[in-house]
Amino acid sequence: MRPGTMTDFSHEKQLPPEAEIDAVRRDAPLELIRFQDAARIVPLSERPTMEAWLETFNAGETEAA
């Protein structure tokens, strides 16, 4: 399993139950799917940490308020 496949890991370990994971895959908003597809293009070593990403995200929310 490659890094970044948390859904596959969760599915394999049945965390949460398989039916819930399948529902998330089925019902995920199209925008989220597009975001994940775009993020997948960037090598892991070049992606920001979650902390940095959240800081950038939150800064944008502050500006929008």
Image (cartoon, grey):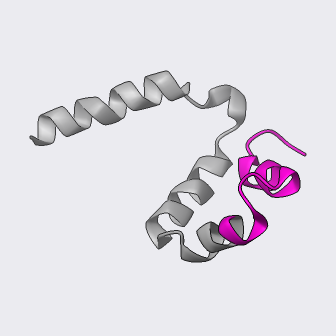
- For the point 70% across and 26% down, the residue is 45
Residue 32 at x, y percent in the picture: 49, 61
Residue 40 at x, y percent in the picture: 66, 50
> Range of the magenta residues?
1-20
- 9 displayed left or right of 50: right
Image: 33 above or below 56: below
- 46 displayed left or right of 9: left
Q: Residue furthest bottom?
A: 26
Image: 52 above or below 24: above
Residue 21 at x, y percent in the picture: 69, 64
- For the point 40% across and 30% down, the residue is 54
Image: 29 above or below 15: below
- 19 displayed left or right of 61: right
- 31 displayed left or right of 16: left
Image: 28 above or below 58: below
Residue 18 lies in the magenta stretch? yes
Q: What is the number of callouts on the image?
A: 0
Residue 30 at x, y percent in the picture: 49, 72
Q: Residue furthest front?
A: 17
Image quadrant holding the C terminus, namely top left
- For the point 86% across and 43% down, the residue is 2
- For the point 54% across and 75% down, the residue is 27
Residue 6 lies in the magenta stretch? yes
